[in-house]
Image: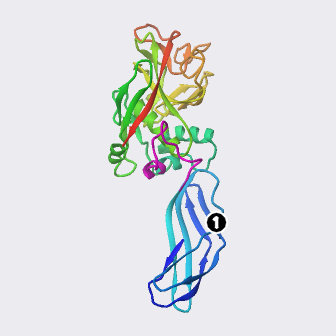
Amino acid sequence: MTFGYTGPTEHDAVVTIDPCTYHTASGTFTVMASPSTFNVHFTPGGQATVEFALSGIPDFVTLGDFILPFSCQSTVTGLAGNAGTRLYLTDAKPLGSPYGRQLPVWTNVLEDACRFATGFAGASNVRNKCTYYLFWYHCDPGLYPIFFYDYSTPRFSEVTSVADEGPVSYRYNLTQLFAERTPYNFIVSGDCQDISFYLQICTSSLGVPLLAIQERADPNVGFWTNWLCGTGRDATLLTYYQVYDFNFHQHNVVGDLAFDAAAAQLFSLDGANYRNPPMSWPQTPSNSSYWQKPISPPTSQGSSFVGLVNKYFGSGGTQGETVARTTTTARIQVLR
């Protein structure tokens, strides 16, 4: 912390840092400076810098306003006031390419990501909380979902290149996303590409890796889903669930775990009532995972499968069938 003096008199002064306050989304914390008192010397037109450690800062993800009261007193001058800043606490150092390409991180993103994971630490918690709250953002009083799921076309994700048997590269337009969310918290439509990439961007801003993949039926004839509820709707209500016909679906993975903030599933992989977005569901094998899992007896909706996929497009009946899949990595090549 640096103090400047513009007068003509060389003199000594005492700088004091009083107990600080950090008003966060998880509560208010008292933060102490150590040391908190400094003897400094000013020359005419000179500066004095003090350095101190802070204790009492939370050891979990959060965000809020940090207020630091200070004074600088001498026989020549007297100064007192508060220094304040918006302080974001992440789980680890934010990640760049290929996860989110944010160096430095956008504070607009941190406003969302830190709120999603506030009060939690550890990569597993961060991924689950970001997935949950990106889907359920409106459960926080005064806030609304960021996205209203519309699977017809992407709004903020633009393909830049497609490699044979390789990843699909995208340009993601964060500038447009935040412009359309003005005034803040205004809901925007988006498809699975928009939503999964934004989840990846959020976790990477907190220092937690997460990648996006696209999955298709094999052969690539499209598929019918099981009962899903898109984000922006109340997934506790059965009336908002429906089956979709997809050419592909994009979601997030890390290792052998799958995450999907775009759509809640009516049933868990055990066939129990679920009505939440998949978080840390197994990604493999294809016949017993997020993609699809046989179940007996059939669900209350008449399907013999749970997970994302029910059957190939064009197949009849409601019980479903085993559907093979192919997987392609989707990566953010350009962020603007």
261 relative to 56, above or below: above
Judged from this view, the residue extending furthest toward the top is: 316
Q: Is residue 325 left or right of residue 52?
A: left
Crowding near pointer 1: few (<14 within 10 Å), some, many (20+)? Answer: few
The image quarter containing residue 56 is: bottom right
Answer whether residue 52 is magenta in the image: no
Q: Quadrant of the N terminus?
A: bottom right
Name the main secondary structure of what is drawn in magenta: loop
Q: Amino acid at mark 1?
A: Ala
Spot occupied by residue 298 in the image (x, y as percentages of width and height)? 58, 14
**Which span of residues is magenta-colored?**
88-110
The front one of 265 and 335 is 335
Residue 140 appears in view: yes
The front one of 29 and 6 is 6
Residue 241 appears in view: no
Q: Is residue 10 left or right of residue 194?
A: right
The front one of 278 and 155 is 155
Q: Quadrant of the C terminus?
A: top left
The image quarter containing residue 292 is: top right
Spot occupied by residue 91 in the image (x, y as percentages of width and height)? 59, 47
Spot occupied by residue 232 in the image (x, y as percentages of width and height)? 42, 37
67 relative to 112, above or below: below
What residue is shown at x 33% (from left), y 35% (from top)?
Answer: 155
Q: Secondary structure at mark 1?
A: strand
Which residue was labeled with disc 1?
53
